[in-house]
Image (spheres, rainbow, N blue to C red):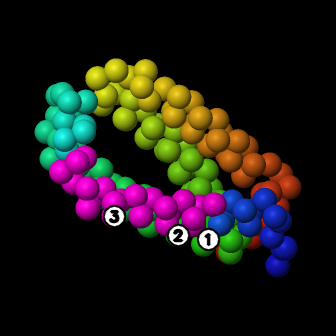
Amino acid sequence: MQKRSKGVTILGWFLIITSITGTLINVYTFMARPAFIAKYSTHLFRFDSELIYQITAIFGVAISVFKFILGLNILKLRETWRKITICYFLFDILYMLCPMFLLVNPTEGLGGFLAESIINSLLIYFLIRPTTKEQFETV
């Protein structure tokens, strides 16, 4: 069995911690439902703000649970989950485009999109490096 590097350990814990943070944000969003709808109803000019609220809450919880599972399996050095994590980071880049186009002014979300795209691209690069790939075992 291969020894896990510090980078892989940090990545696994990063996924776990961000999933917990995402869950807390979803709980806050659930509790602050009237404020969420009041704030974003002007931005979501084409959509029903109640429907968007429900979709984002359900989708946010699903992503948080999935990231927690990713983090655990990265820490266990499972090759299949390394590949799934790469796909998740690619999905996350595309998923960040949604808020940009749902807003009235898409340039409002451009900074967040660029920052997250750069971070996800670096994480993908880290996961496809040969020294990182050799740590994972195929089961």
Which numbered disc flags the more N-terminal residue, 1 or 3?
Answer: 3
Q: Amino acid at mark 1?
A: Asn
Q: Which residue is mark 2?
A: 69
Q: Is residue 68 left or right of residue 3?
A: left
Q: Which residue is mark 3?
A: 27
Residue 89 position in % (x across, y down): 56, 47
Residue contact between numbered discs 1 and 3, judged by CB atoms under 8 Å: no
Q: Residue at the spot x=86%, y=55% of the render?
A: 131
Q: Secondary structure at mark 3?
A: helix
Residue 30 position in % (x across, y down): 26, 60
> Real-space Cα distance between discs 1 and 3?
25 Å
Residue contact between numbered discs 2 and 3, judged by CB atoms under 8 Å: no
Q: Quadrant of the N terminus?
A: bottom right
Q: Amino acid at mark 3?
A: Val
Q: Quadrant of residue 17?
A: bottom right
Q: Is residue 82 left or right of residue 53?
A: right
Dot 1, how many residues are within 10 Å of its Cα: few (below 14), some (14-19), or many (20+)? some
Please tell me whether residue 20 belongs to the stretch shown in magenta: yes
Residue 4 position in % (x across, y down): 80, 70
Dot 3, how many residues are within 10 Å of its Cα: few (below 14), some (14-19), or many (20+)? some
Which numbered disc flags the more N-terminal residue, 2 or 3?
Answer: 3
> From which residue to which does the magenta span run?
14-36
Residue contact between numbered discs 2 and 1, judged by CB atoms under 8 Å: yes
The disc at residue 73 is: 1
Q: Is residue 122 above or below residue 73?
A: above
